[in-house]
Amino acid sequence: MLHILLLALLESLSVLAVPTATPAPATASASASRFAAMDTAIRSGEFKKTTSVLVQVDGKTLFEGYYNGADAATLHNTRSATKTITGMLVGLALDRELLPSVTAPVLPYFRDREPLANPDPRKAKITVEDFLTMSSLLECDDWNEFSRGNEERMYVVEDWVKFTLDLPIKGFPGWTAKPADSPYGRSFSYCTAGVATLGAVLERATKRPVPDFARETLFAPLGIEKAQWQFTPLGTAMTGGGLGLTSRDLATLAQLYLDGGRRGGKTIVPEAWVRESIRPHARIDEETEYGYLWWLKAFAPASGGPPQRAFFMTGTGGNKVFAFPDLRAVVVVTTVNYREKDAHPLTERLLTEHVLPALTARP
């Protein structure tokens, strides 16, 4: 099903509070033609296995398309986009004083997992923030197939928390930067095991299952009625990936952060947590930084014009939920390209060649 809703376009877009330094809002004719071209490209197979594209400005839908058997009710498994939602839940636990602070050490929540393999006093200093920023000292790297902490090794054992805490402290060979020599004082290493362990921290800190806490504090206040969680072998919600949500609900979560944590005049997530979450805490590469489980990067429209800064969720297969503060725009792209090596570049090409030119088009 496809909806190209341009909403009496000039009327609805003319009220946007867009800074003068950013491109003018899209016009009806220019954006409609570009969205139509994108729809044709997706249906032709150019952007293979795409299941949905949803584009909103200030919560108003400009384009909503579903493909390959998906529809508006489909709960998309966006894989590691779940991690960003886990960061939201950590902020909500902190706001309710169920967690003392981001500097709270992790080990005291798991005395039942001791004694730990590879004992090291530095493990006692691993904090909630270390897992929020993918920068703990544990030897855990999903991007390195040889890493002891690679997520594929975690999935074949029963106790994922103990798997994580038993990992050795990583070394820093000469070709890698130590935390002290890294931007923001943190050395980034993509680690699903750490975020899965955050779920267990949340469960113990809040004294209830993560899905219940998420429903009470985040989903219900936003009107999100259906969420399909995955679970670890020991029954804790898998907070590192696999949560199923509709495209519209994913957009609602991104819009919440665009709006400083507020919805309908009510604060859902504290504004201070939103600000802290979407500012850089670690550097991934020369173009990409990392907040509290949010990715931070700028994307340039292929049609020309300045790069547009974004904070976004991302998951295997090229699943991405973008928020563009200067455009007041949210873009959701879901796919099932789980085994495609070029899945992420493919989604970003869809964004830069079609969506951003539509959002920044001039007459």
Image (tube, rainbow, N blue to C red):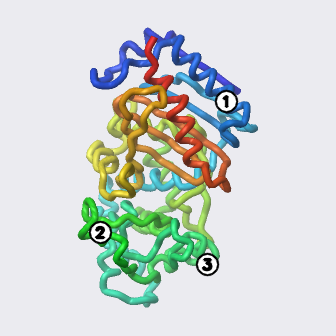
Between the C-alphas of marks 3 and 1, the distance is 42 Å
Residue at image location 54% in from the left, 37% down from the top:
332
Task: Confirm whether residue 207 shows in the render.
Answer: no
Tell me if residue 36 comes above or below residue 244 in the rendering.
above
Q: Are marks 3 and 1 in contact (CB under 8 Å)?
A: no
Decide if residue 265 is on the left or right side of residue 32.
left
Q: Measured from the top left, where is residue 1 in percent x and y? A: 71, 27
Q: Measured from the top left, where is residue 268 in percent x and y? A: 37, 41
Decide if residue 257 is on the left or right side of residue 49.
left
Tell me if residue 75 comes above or below residue 38 in the rendering.
below
Q: Circle 1 — which element?
A: helix
The kind of residue on which mark 1 rests is: Ala
Q: Earlier in the sequence, mark 3 or mark 1?
A: 1
Kindly report which numbered mark, 3 or 2, lies closer to the viewer in this rendering: 3
Identify the image quadrant of residue 136: bottom left
Q: Circle 2 — which element?
A: loop
Residue at image location 63% in from the left, 21% down from the top:
36
The kind of residue on which mark 3 rests is: Val
Which dot marks residue 41? 1
Tell me if residue 93 comes above or below residue 161 in the rendering.
above
Q: Measured from the top left, where is residue 75 in percent x and y? A: 64, 44
Q: Earlier in the sequence, mark 2 or mark 1?
A: 1
Please identify the quadrant where the C terminus is shown: top left
Q: Are marks 2 and 1 in contact (CB under 8 Å)?
A: no
Q: Which residue is the site of mark 3?
A: 157
Q: Which residue is the site of mark 2?
A: 104
- Within 10 angstroms of label 3, few (less than 14), some, or many (20 or more) residues? few
Between the C-alphas of marks 3 and 2, the distance is 27 Å
- Within 10 angstroms of label 2, few (less than 14), some, or many (20 or more) residues? some
